[in-house]
Image (cartoon, grey):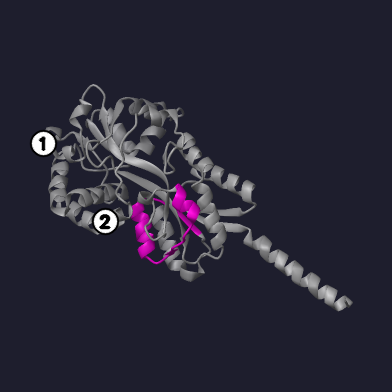
Amino acid sequence: MGARSVTTILTVTLLLGGTVAQAAEVNLYSARKEALIKPLLDKFTTQTGIKVNLVTAKADALLKRLESEGRNSPADVLLTVDAGRLHRARHAGVLQAVKSDRLAADIPAAYRDPEGYWYGLSLRARTILYVKGKVDPKELVSYESLSNPKWKKRICIRSSNNIYNQSLVASLVAANGEQKTEAWAKGLVANMARSPKGGDRDQIKAAAAGQCDLAVVNTYYYAKMLHAKKDPAQQAAANKMGIVWPNQSNRGAHVNVSGAAVTAAAKNRDNAIKLIEFLASAEAQEWYAQVNYEFPVRPGTPISDTLSGWGAFKADTLNLSALGQNNAKALRLMDRADWK
């Protein structure tokens, strides 16, 4: 073999080696704050050698960015919250379907897109909190009961432009139909203690301050407030509240997900799938439940003492893709009900 041939082989080898090195990465657009996801990403890199390049921003901003970047987007994975947003991303054409035996085995069908466009990674219930000593929790048997006139001027809840509320209403449309859900929404609006404002934590603070007796919130925020040792006022407000699991005699409490998807423009598709598979693994799922106060999507995963202290509950088994499919109906009826 001549010197020129050896040189050529070495050159090709170096080029291929460079390609492999460059390929050992994955680009993640995350609507979750860095502190809520970075420790898991570091573990993934340690185990696989795949570097994760993280970009964080608000969920809606990330979707707009993916749409504007189109096929030139550097993103390989989108991580966002709420099945309604994942549905929007799918129908905006910025996601691609992937099949993974591991993901199919680890994630129950209700928490993933039927065609593989997105996969749920952690759960939170949107439930009802009550002020201890002012409300008998036995009166709160269902979401439907929130429209009962006995709660007039006693409910705090976010605005209708909040995706969490839209998905809750979308689940009610799936259960009861649009007409009955609109009547329910009108009853709920009549029972609001104030015009909707602020986030979930603000609803809890308002209830604790005596502005209302009930607050509709995601469990994740409630748990975070209970552990807000650096903010005693926030912790004190949460401690005044008790939790109810609605609809335990029928479909179960409404749950939603944070979830991940491979982007349509993914250049590192295999690494993207590996990352999502890792986030659904037993190790990552336990981290969500122990550190982040979210319920794992993977059955049998141990949860934190805080979550277990609330007691076991029955979750709605509605496939969460229905939340996106019913979003437009939910928005229309919320508007007709004058839900600000």
Task: Answer whether residue 116 is magenta in the image.
Answer: no
Residue 84 lies in the magenta-colored region: yes
Question: Which span of residues is magenta-colored?
Answer: 77-106
x, y percent for residue 109: 37, 51
Q: CA distance from mark 1 to mark 2?
A: 26 Å
Q: Nearer the viewer, residue 68 or 39?
A: 39
- In the rendered image, which quarter is residue 5 located in? bottom right
Q: What mark, if any, has residue 30 been given in the picture?
A: none
Q: Residue furthest top?
A: 133
Q: Which mark is residue 327?
A: 2
Q: Would you place residue 210 above or below residue 27 in this image? A: above
Q: Is residue 16 above or below residue 240?
A: below
Pointer 2 local density, CA inside 10 Å: few below 14, some 14–19, many at least 20: many
Q: Is residue 118 left or right of residue 24?
A: left
Q: Compared to 127, does 267 lie above or below? A: below
Amino acid type of the residue tagged 1 in the rendering? Pro
Q: Quadrant of the N terminus?
A: bottom right
Which secondary structure lies at badge 2?
Answer: helix
Mark 1 burial class by Cα count in 10 Å: few <14, some 14-19, many 20+? few
Instruction: Classify mark 1: helix, strand or loop.
Output: helix
Q: Is residue 312 visible?
A: yes
**Residue drawn at x 71%, y 68% as measured from the top left:** 16
**Residue lying at 31% horizontally and 50% vertically, measured from the top left:** 163
Residue 294: % across, % down: 42, 39
Q: Position of residue 100 (x, y in %)?
A: 48, 57
Q: Position of residue 97 (x, y in %)?
A: 44, 63
Residue under pointer 1: 149
Amino acid carrying label 2: it is Asn
281 or 230: nearer the viewer? 281
